[in-house]
Image (spheres, rainbow, N blue to C red):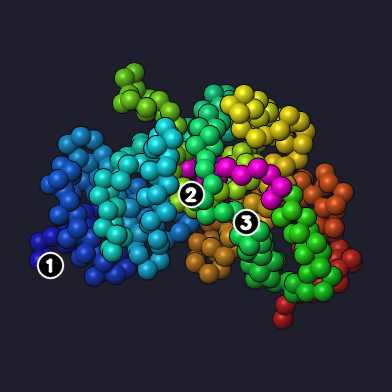
Amino acid sequence: MSQAHTPHASTSPDIAWSDPERAARFSTWLTQVAPQHALHPQTLRLASADASFRRYFRIDSSQGSCIIMDAPPQLENCQPFVKVAQLMTKAGLRAPEVLAWDEPLGFMLLTDLGNKTMMQVIDKDNPGANLPLYLQAVDALITWQLSSSPDVLPPYDEALLRRELELFPEWYLGRHKGLTVAGEMRLTLDKAFAQIIATNLAQPSVFVHRDFMPRNLMAPVPSERPPEGARALGVLDFQDAVYGPITYDIASLMRDAFLSWDEAFCLDVTVRYWQKARQAGLPVGDDFGEFYRGVEWMGLQRHLKVAGIFARLTLRDGKPHYLADTPRFATYIRNTCARYRELKPLLRLVEQAEGYVEPEVFGFGRQS
């Protein structure tokens, strides 16, 4: 590859390449796809990075802007992303369209859904002002769930639920808090995990986005005459979608990893989702109280998992900013456990791990 092409891959000073060979391959790929899609390589700039090994660039074209995904194939499998993007588009959702994909290299050109996420346009100080946005999210979620079919996406089964829950004792309690997870602590976790898994597997199954929250939803295009479909929220970061509990995505939306609302607002949106879902024929049951219990237990599983993931991102992957949000998860976990008698042992364990009470019950110690 000639040196004349190299600047295309590093036009913007905020785009760094740790591997010069990958930078050169990217430059060659971009040079090849640019004419077909009327791209302007000199406009390449960093758009975002996420908790995985993927990162995203934005680039201008003669028809607007596009997104480029950089996903090293030895670290990221893009096939699920492509499959779920097609499922979402078929369902009528506003999802990125794959314009070009070099699967062996891990470079992908996508349509651009805009530069403002739902999180960026939310009024954090006034929950009620955000109700229209959340109802749009509810509509998108119901559209996604109504398109569900078994045997299309991987099952959110007992094995996967258990693997996710084990991230909490391994990474959060063990490696982050420095606790020895054994004896009474291990027995308490095992009993709680068995109850959580059984409760969640009892829910009807639908397509599950698995990270359905404002950071992964794109705000509608604020134009008087936006392109067709652009008035709807866009959906991103869906490559881990599965077929599992119907309670998962609404729990994810209202018990956000990066944003907390008071209980009244969470209840308001959740009951509106339940009403709309019932009217649409989704299997949410006729008793909202029972459904809300299911949402809370599903949220508990998610929060235990994410606390472990955020600790792993800090300790293994060198991304310490995620751990700053772990107090939010401790609060979610404590609030849910406090409401259910069978979860009180888990509540005591978490409160002791967080230093709220003295560790008298379990007799666990710090790792040496």
Name the residue type under label 2. Val
Distance (Cα) linking label 2 and label 1: 41 Å
Report the residue marked by disc 2.
152
Report the disc number at residue 1.
1
Q: Is residue 2 above or below residue 281?
A: below
To which quarter of the image does residue 225 belong?
top left
Distance (Cα) linking label 2 and label 3: 14 Å
Across and down, in percent, residue 248 comes to 62, 44
Tell which circle, 2 or 3, labels the residue nearer the N-terminal end: 2
Please report the residue visible at 61 percent of the width from the left and 60 percent of the height from the top: 160
Please report the residue visible at 87 percent of the width from the left and 49 percent of the height from the top: 341
Report the residue marked by disc 3.
157
- Camera sees residue 160: yes
Q: At numbered mark 2, what does the secondary structure look like: helix, strand or loop?
A: loop
Task: Give the camera-side residue of 30 and 41.
Answer: 30
Task: Give the camera-side residue of 259 and 356.
Answer: 259
The stretch of residues the image draws in magenta is 200-216
Name the residue type under label 1. Met
